[in-house]
Image (cartoon, helix red, strand yellow):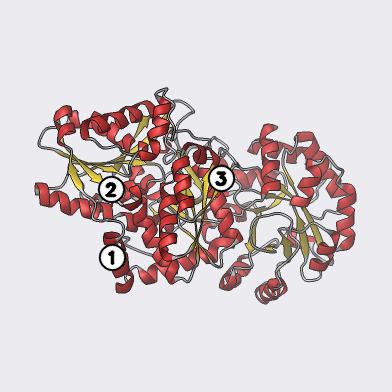
């Protein structure tokens, strides 16, 4: 079984997101370790991009902080190498196609394997355009995490059938950020996904409170929280309490 | 569309460039646009409505004007200007907006959103939204709302809401980001009218097709006038909408040289430039695989040009393809050269042309004297320059009220 899929066995997974090098190298390493020691099952590490069109203002500003700290792709790999001295928590990257493309698909996947990165979430790389990267992702055993949106409609079947690791279910339309309401269609969509695949489904985009996490964990296999955590980091707050609270809720 | 060129509508690529690199949240909407375009582009009612609006509302065909004074002054090739500046709203942008808005209307969309650089595409979109009774919101970099205040007010007069975009470098690239984000937020009733020949398929193709009216007309006009094809076609390139429209009908005519003029800003070898093809490399951004100004990590550069309309770090995928296959040539024109051309064409021909178009005029000034008197250049004047008068005055150290 795929190593990411294994994480979801007999439990609901909590998947927090942090931006690499926000606000600096050491804090990012510390934040990842704190999350790993306080309930996080998979940690999603964002490689900043100059033009993060799928992200809301909170993560855009975090990307800017990381650029101020001098982030680049190799710095992010260095952060992971440092983290790997202390933990083997499953890690995945979230970034944009151009970052991976410019690094070289093969070289990027190879470095991911060497650092035990299990998967890639690339919001601007839809299924139809994944071919070139998939070849190397398979070769180096990296899961390409598929996103499914409330608008995916008749695309759900073909995306679900290609999915591995887990499926990133976009909770509501728009970009990442906190929202109070989630589409009621969500559970219907997840039911439909389950018709085509046993790959776990994690919900992300706009989840911030423990109550929301709890409610959504009833219909999904995992909960992804990004902006809410990035905001705590921006405020210089410790992540342990929040992380434990979410893990306990799901 | 019989008159529209794409050989295989299933193909989303121009050679290695193009594609649909867009979030899953937009894929269904994008496919709907593709399907609608495929469905209507050959539809006689659609074509009839398009042509009627182009002629009765947009003032087409535009003139092919023989620039006798410039021709004599430069002492080489005969120079013709394709006068897109005489279109309603003052630029080529209206050609494409009418087409896309007609598709939007047939799809039942009630709201148009668009990015704009210099404001010409925003004005054209606001104009058609007013005509069709649709809602309209325009995203424009804060830098550009400051340097193109006249166009901002024009859009507001036409009933559009203009959002100054304050993220990133606050220019065209950031306006595209903001418009994509807004489309993600509200796809159900909204159509994104892409203004340049960029973005995910089918946008580059739609823009190619709707702008190709420029070269369809110019080809017929030059045959009527001179009985032969031009030796060179010159147009400015930001994302590349007027250039692709100016080139389209000549791409298969191997003897017609195609030249795109990019904004070199302070110089192609400086970091204050927008000369994507000379300075850029292959990348994937704004929905397409194409050429971009970017660093080694794939972070998109901040770009610079005096011209808000050319101030873009990428170029349409078909231009990248034409460049790499050497079918078209792309040259950089600096701010200084463009401003000189702005003044030159005004004094020589009595035409105040957009600063974007003056990048092409500047190259014609260099090219024409190297050619013989029996050769012909067609240069597209993509827009009129009223919007630029205040900022050119400022460039020359004169402060005037707008």
Chain to which the residue tagged by mark 2 belongs: B
**Residue B315, image quadrant:** top left
> Which residue is rendered at x = 57% and y = 45% of the image?
B165
Q: Nearer the viewer, residue B237 or B101?
A: B101
Q: Position of residue B20 (x, y in %)?
A: 49, 57
Circles 3, 1 touching at the beta carbon (< 8 Å): no
Q: Nearer the viewer, residue B354 or A148?
A: B354
Q: Nearer the viewer, residue B319 or B120?
A: B120
Element carrying mark 3: strand
Give the quadrant of the C terminus of chain B.
top left
Q: What crowding class fits label 2: few (fewer than 14 Cα within 10 Å), some (14-19), or many (20 or more)?
A: many
Q: Which residue is mark 3?
A: B164
**Residue A193, image quadrant:** bottom right
**Residue B189 in view of the camera:** yes
Labels 2 and 1: the sequence-earlier one:
1
Q: What crowding class fits label 1: few (fewer than 14 Cα within 10 Å), some (14-19), or many (20 or more)?
A: some
Q: Position of residue B366 (x, y in %)?
A: 25, 29
Labels 3 and 1: the sequence-earlier one:
1
Q: Which residue is mark 1?
A: B52
Q: CA distance from mark 3 to mark 1?
A: 34 Å
Q: Nearer the viewer, residue B314 or A200?
A: B314
Q: CA distance from mark 3 to mark 2?
A: 28 Å
Q: Position of residue B148 (x, y in %)?
A: 46, 40
**Residue B370, image quadrant:** top left
Q: Which residue is mark 2?
A: B86
């Amino acid at each position: 079984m795929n190593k990411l899929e294994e994480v979801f066995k007999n439990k609901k997974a909590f998947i927090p997101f942090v931006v690499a090098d926000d606000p600096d190298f050491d804090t990012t390493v510390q934040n990842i370790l704190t999350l790993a020691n306080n309930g996080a099952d998979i940690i999603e590490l964002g490689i900043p991009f100059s033009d993060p069109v799928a992200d809301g203002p909170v993560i855009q500003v975090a990307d800017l902080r990381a650029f101020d700290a001098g982030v680049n792709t190799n710095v992010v790999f260095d952060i992971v190498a440092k983290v790997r001295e202390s933990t083997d928590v499953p890690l995945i990257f979230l970034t944009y196609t151009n970052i991976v493309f410019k690094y070289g698909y093969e070289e990027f996947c190879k470095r991911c394997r060497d650092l035990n990165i299990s998967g890639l979430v690339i919001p601007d790389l839809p299924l139809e355009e994944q071919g070139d990267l998939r070849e190397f992702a398979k070769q180096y055993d990296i899961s390409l995490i598929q996103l499914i949106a409330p608008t995916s409609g008749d695309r759900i079947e073909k995306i679900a059938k290609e999915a591995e690791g887990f499926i990133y279910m976009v909770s509501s339309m728009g970009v990442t950020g906190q929202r109070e309401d989630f589409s009621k269609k969500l559970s219907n969509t997840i039911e439909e996904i389950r018709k085509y695949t046993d790959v776990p489904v994690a919900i992300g985009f706009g989840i911030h409170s423990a109550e929301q996490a709890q409610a959504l964990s009833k219909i999904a296999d995992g909960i992804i929280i990004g902006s809410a955590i990035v905001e705590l980091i921006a405020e210089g707050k410790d992540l342990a309490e929040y992380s434990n609270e979410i893990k306990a809720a799901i | 569309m019989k008159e529209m060129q794409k050989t295989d509508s299933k193909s989303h690529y121009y050679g290695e460039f193009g594609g649909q690199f867009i979030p899953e949240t937009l894929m269904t909407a994008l496919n709907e646009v593709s399907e609608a375009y495929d469905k209507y582009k050959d539809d006689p009612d659609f074509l009839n409505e398009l042509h009627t609006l182009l002629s009765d509302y947009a003032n087409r065909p535009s003139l092919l004007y023989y620039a006798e004074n410039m021709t004599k002054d430069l002492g080489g090739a005969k120079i013709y200007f394709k006068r897109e500046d005489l279109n309603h709203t003052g630029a080529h942008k209206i050609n494409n907006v009418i087409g896309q808005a007609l598709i939007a209307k047939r799809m039942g969309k009630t709201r148009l959103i668009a990015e704009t650089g210099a404001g010409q595409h925003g004005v054209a979109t606001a104009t058609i939204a007013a005509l069709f009774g649709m809602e309209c919101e325009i995203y424009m970099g804060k830098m550009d709302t400051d340097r193109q205040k006249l166009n901002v007010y024009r859009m507001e007069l036409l009933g559009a809401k203009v959002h100054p975009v304050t993220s990133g470098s606050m220019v065209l690239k950031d306006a595209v980001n903001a418009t994509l984000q807004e489309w993600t937020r509200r796809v159900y009733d909204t159509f994104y009218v892409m203004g340049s020949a960029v973005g995910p398929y089918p946008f580059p193709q739609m823009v190619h097709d709707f702008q190709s009216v420029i070269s369809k007309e110019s080809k017929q006009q030059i045959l009527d006038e001179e009985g032969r094809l031009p030796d060179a076609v010159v147009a400015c390139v930001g994302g590349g909408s007027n250039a692709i429209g100016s080139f389209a009908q000549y791409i298969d005519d191997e003897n017609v040289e195609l030249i795109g003029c990019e904004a070199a800003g302070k110089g192609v070898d400086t970091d204050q430039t927008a000369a994507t093809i000379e300075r850029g490399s292959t990348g994937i951004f704004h929905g397409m695989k194409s050429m971009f100004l970017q660093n080694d990590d794939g972070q998109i550069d901040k770009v610079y040009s005096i011209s808000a309309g050319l101030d873009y770090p990428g170029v349409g995928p078909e231009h990248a393809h034409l460049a790499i296959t050497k079918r078209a040539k792309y040259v950089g024109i600096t701010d200084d050269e463009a401003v000189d051309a702005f003044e030159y064409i005004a004094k020589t021909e009595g035409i105040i042309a957009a600063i974007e178009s003056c990048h092409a005029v500047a190259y014609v000034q260099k090219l024409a004297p190297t050619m013989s008197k029996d050769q012909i250049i067609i240069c597209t004047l993509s827009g009129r320059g009223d919007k630029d008068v205040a900022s050119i005055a400022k460039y020359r150290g004169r402060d005037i009220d707008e």
